[in-house]
Image (cartoon, rainbow, N blue to C red):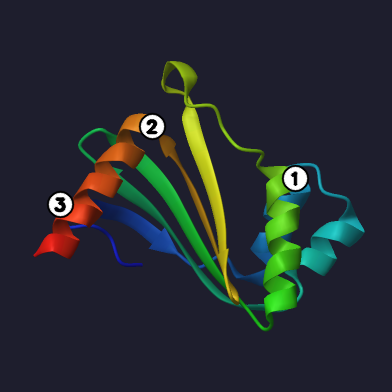
Amino acid sequence: LPVPEGAQVPFSTSLGELCSRIVLLSRGAAKEEAAAAAAGWAGDAVALVSFPAGEAVVWVSAWDTEKDAVEFLEAMKKAFPPGSAAEGKPTRGLIQRGTTVEFVEAPLEALAEAVAMAKAAERK
């Protein structure tokens, strides 16, 4: 996973189709829904990204088709509703780009720092 300059990645791995299904099941998805949402998995990478202001979990998954990506995105939205930025609680984001789904969870300060680092890198 590409990370902004100045950030560190103390841990990264791939979850695979089975773990993608298990994640959904552990967050309350029905067995059939989790199986259907994880079908069509084409690859993924998950990392713990460390910033001076905190840590973020970043999970990028690839899917066989855009329909598979949308199905996984919708299941993830149910499993991980948007987080609250109030009182420094973790904040979540889910984005689908074609056949890719990106999930990020981090304290607001770490997200703001990540955005600032990415913008600084773009200006270089």
Q: Position of residue 85 (x, y in %)?
A: 47, 26
SS category of the residue bearing label 1:
helix
The circle drawn on residue 108 is 2
Mark nearest the camera among 2 and 3 is 2
| Real-space Cα separation, disc 2 to disc 1, in angstroms | 21 Å
The circle drawn on residue 78 is 1
* Residue displayed at 28% across by 55% down: 9
Q: Amino acid at mark 1?
A: Lys
Mark closest to the chain's N terminus, 2 or 3: 3
Quarter that holds the N terminus:
bottom left
Q: Is residue 86 left or right of residue 37?
A: left
Q: Nearer the viewer, residue 20 or 121?
A: 121
Q: Based on the displayed image, in which of its 4 quarters is residue 34 positioned?
A: bottom right
* Residue displayed at 60% across by 77% down: 99
SS category of the residue bearing label 3:
loop
Q: Is residue 51 left or right of residue 88?
A: left
Q: Amino acid at mark 3?
A: Gly
Quarter that holds the C terminus:
bottom left
Q: Is 83 above or below relative to 103? A: above
The circle drawn on residue 6 is 3
Q: Residue furthest front?
A: 123
The circle drawn on residue 124 is none
Determine contact: label 2, label 1, CB under 8 Å: no
Dot 2 crowding, Cα within 10 Å, few <14, some 14–19, many 20+: many
| Real-space Cα separation, disc 2 to disc 3, in angstroms | 18 Å
| Real-space Cα separation, disc 3 to disc 1, in angstroms | 33 Å
Determine contact: label 2, label 3, CB under 8 Å: no
Dot 1 crowding, Cα within 10 Å, few <14, some 14–19, many 20+: few
Q: Position of residue 29 (x, y in %)?
A: 82, 48
